[in-house]
Image (cartoon, rainbow, N blue to C red):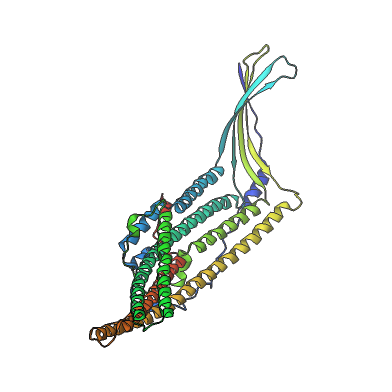
Amino acid sequence: MRKLILHCRRAPLICISAILLLAGCAGVSPPPLPVGGAPAAWRNAGSMAAPGPAPDFKHWWRVFGDAKIDLLVKRAIENNLDLRQAIARFRAARALTGRSQAELLPSLSVRTYSLPDPSGTTSYFQSGFDAEWELGLFGRRDGTLRMADADVGIAAASVQAAQVSVVAEVVRSYMELRAAQERETLLARLVEVETRHLALIRSRFRLNLASEAEVGQAEARLAQAEAALAEPHAAAARSAQQIALLLGENHPDAGLLAVVPRPTLGTLRIGVVPAEMLRTRPDIRKIEQEVLKAAAELGVARADLYPRLVLAGGLTFSTRLGGNSLGTTHGVISAGPIIDIPLFDWGMRRAVVNARDAALSATLLAYRQAVLEGVAEVETVLAALEHLREQVESMDKAVASLERSARATQVLARNGLADGFPCVAADKALLDARLERAQAEEARSLAFIALYKALGGAPPLGVQDD
């Protein structure tokens, strides 16, 4: 025969009603973010502030007009290991939001255990179901969910930061590779010019028109020119290997080492205003999410100052395994609230609230600092870009003048009005100027890359929808 025994416990309705009424008074809303950190316009934009088409912010590297860069960026986004790690961490954070949501839902568990009789003549086997549901009052529920959402936002900002860095480093390494190849080509021509100069000096020496010291100086200049070839060659190999690393590969493509012209920049415009930087720069977005998380943690800490209300219930069955009434089963149902009221804890809960409040204040200050640092970084790069633009324009004029001078000297030499020395001098001056211009153009290209890295420019990955 089975007996079912039902125990009903009346809940303290007055206490529960008071808790529910007070629950709506707790919680911490996300604080407003500091304003005033971003200026209305870029102070150092210079000629870049003029009206005109600006580079596509999400595909800014296409301003170089090199299809190879497009291909490398695409491969890096697909295969870069740092970026893939960031995406995996984002997916992990997003998966944990399901855990946070599930913790706020009713739970059901099954339990079994054997209970021996103290007399030793019989024993009992008990099993049952337990159900609990914490209501998450006083802002605990909302705070827990906001903390999980903020963790996802922080992980998403980390993905964006990794992506921005990978794209910028791929383009930077590619430009350094092509610039190194250009320097190597120009230095090889300089070796040819120094070789011609040494041959002329030796001819004069054989005619007793030059001293042995002059021959030694010419030989030293040739050796120095040949030694200078090692630096761009090593730089090209280093940049090619860096590109391979960014692509998640061991060895660089053979096509990268083929010498091709270096892409150049034309007239530039900036199409991103300072206010937009707050939405595009990943470190600012990350700290914004950290502010939301700190506010949520403060809300949960304040909720811990108030009672916790759990709706609980259970169904227990007990069966005798020995004795005269073998197999007799009793069932017990229990249901009611569980109220945990904090009374005295030596100020531990209040200390946590104070700590969380201070942490929120610190995070708000960190947000303002991040905005100021972002603006300063962009302004610094803009100033450098404007200076380098002027430098490149001046070097273009210098190269054009030296090209005219070299052509005029060659005409004189062909007409027998000058020997080989003026031609060598003109060629050396022209090559030196071209080297300086190449270095200025490389610096301008790298500054442009740094600008869009500072702005947070990168193509969207769409990880939110994976």
Work out whether residue 400 or residue 407 is closer to the camera in this orientation and state it. 407
410 left or right of 112 in image: left
- Residue 258 x/y as whole percent: 32, 60
Work out whether residue 324 or residue 51 is closer to the camera in this orientation and state it. 51
Work out whether residue 9 or residue 87 is closer to the camera in this orientation and state it. 87
How many numbered dots are placed on residues in this image?
0
Q: Residue at x 31, y 67 (%)?
A: 261
Q: Is residue 46 visible?
A: no
What quarter of the picture does the N terminus occupy? Answer: top right
254 left or right of 144 in image: left
- Residue 379 x/y as whole percent: 48, 74
Q: Is residue 340 above or below residue 58?
A: above
Q: Is residue 416 above or below residue 435?
A: below
Q: In the displayed image of the protein, which residue is found farthest to the bottom?
A: 417
Q: Residue at x 60, y 47 (%)?
A: 136
* Figure quadrant of residue 453: bottom left
- Residue 80 x/y as whole percent: 43, 53
Q: Is residue 155 above or below residue 62?
A: above
Q: Is residue 100 visible?
A: yes
- Residue 68 x/y as whole percent: 32, 60
Q: In the displayed image of the protein, which residue is found farthest to the top?
A: 324
* Figure quadrant of residue 63: bottom left
* Figure quadrant of residue 330: top right
